[in-house]
Image: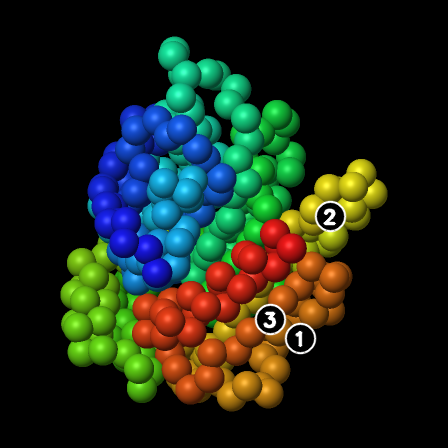
Amino acid sequence: MTTEPLQVQRQTSPSTGLSYLTNATSPQSSLQQISLFIPGFGCPATDYTPLITHLHAHGRTLSAGHVYVAVDLPGHGESPTSILPTPEAGGINKLLVQLHAELLSTLFLSSPPTPNPTPIPTTVYGHSMGTLTVLDLFAYNLTTSPSSLKVTEIILLDGPYSGTTLPTPLDLKTLATHAEYYRSTMPDRIARCFGPHTSPQTIAAVQETYSRLDFAYLIRMSHYYGTVDGRFAQILHALDRHNDQLVATGQQPVRLLDLQSQEGDFESERKSLHKNDVTAHAVFVRKEVDGRWLREYVVEGTGHFPHVDDVEEVGGVVRGFLAEGLA
């Protein structure tokens, strides 16, 4: 366990307007890994504070070259909706690539900042809807050349998706009515996500966060991520092709950790998982991605926020997964 203090500060990206939390705000003499954390639907970057604290405490410190960046998506936390006026059209992937490049130019010890900094291994984390955000980011980054974003690991935290979302038009005429209905049902939806390990403080914080959200905006954003779910299989196939190319040239493949804790419908019923449970999501992922770079883990008997409620277990799994890549 490290004795180095963890100092996390909130920053606003000059180039994107995204608000984020980070432990690195000045040039670093050593950069080993960047961890990019993306929350779920309606969730703030602060959800990742327990996991960042755990990883830091177990030696993944700034002095050892580990940089943490937890992002508030547009319309979430302290990031305004104005930075992405039409979320139903996508665009978060571009903002994240731009933010990542901005961070690299800031963190490298060079004067003036280099316009094309050396890529640093980056682990991307996504929770719930954020699992689609990081998959979309990965797929987009494959088409962007050159890119300073070098994804080496993808960590999915309780992703509920299985490639089944059908393309449907977004009805802007009924959006306001839909948003008000959604707001009225949100307390029940959120309550289904809590588990036996969820603290009263977490419950209160989540409920307060959701009471302030612009649901019309978030519904528009979730519409786009429905299209990403529709491309879920294609993205996993792209991961396979990319990894085959990496392996063929003697490089390490991008590894995928799929960690699950709940299953079910947010509108009606969700249940905690047991170790041997296999969800529709897990069946889908196993079918579509090569098992050589897939690792799976079930957090038993908990809720939809395992990185908050069960951080010691989840943090241990994450550390083991990351260490495996260094073997």
SS at mark 1? Answer: helix
Q: Which residue is at 46% across, 84% downward?
A: 300
Could you say where residue 183 lies in the image, as x and y percent from the top left? 25, 67
Residue 16, picture quadrant: top left
Q: Quadrant of the C terminus?
A: bottom right
Colour convention of the picture: rainbow
Residue pointed to by mark 2: 243
Name of the residue lying farthest toward the right: 248
Question: Relative to the observer, which residue lies in front, 95 or 172?
Answer: 95
Q: Which residue is at 36% across, 40% downward?
A: 63
Q: Which marked residue is nearer to the observer: mark 1 or mark 3?
A: 3
Counting residues from the start of the chain, the first of labels 2 and 3 encountered is 2
Three-letter code, disc 1? Val
Q: Which residue is at 63% across, 27% downward?
A: 145
Q: Is residue 219 visible?
A: no
SS at mark 3? Answer: strand
The Cα atoms of the two marked residues, 1 and 3, are separated by 11 Å
Counting residues from the start of the chain, the first of labels 1 and 3 encountered is 1
Counting residues from the start of the chain, the first of labels 1 and 2 encountered is 2
Could you say where residue 216 lies in the image, as x and y percent from the top left? 30, 55
Could you say where residue 192 lies in the image, as x and y percent from the top left? 34, 81
Q: Which residue is at 56% across, 62% downward?
A: 321
Q: Is residue 278 positioned above or below 259 on the image?
A: below
Q: Is residue 265 positioned above or below 103 on the image?
A: below
Three-letter code, disc 3? Glu
Residue 46, picture quadrant: bottom left
Q: Is residue 312 positioned above or below 56 on the image?
A: below
Residue pointed to by mark 1: 283
**How many C-alpha atoms fall within 10 Å of the one at disc 3: few (<14), some, or many (≥20)?**
some
Residue pointed to by mark 3: 296
Q: Quadrant of the N terminus?
A: bottom left
Could you say where residue 210 lies in the image, as x and y percent from the top left? 23, 64
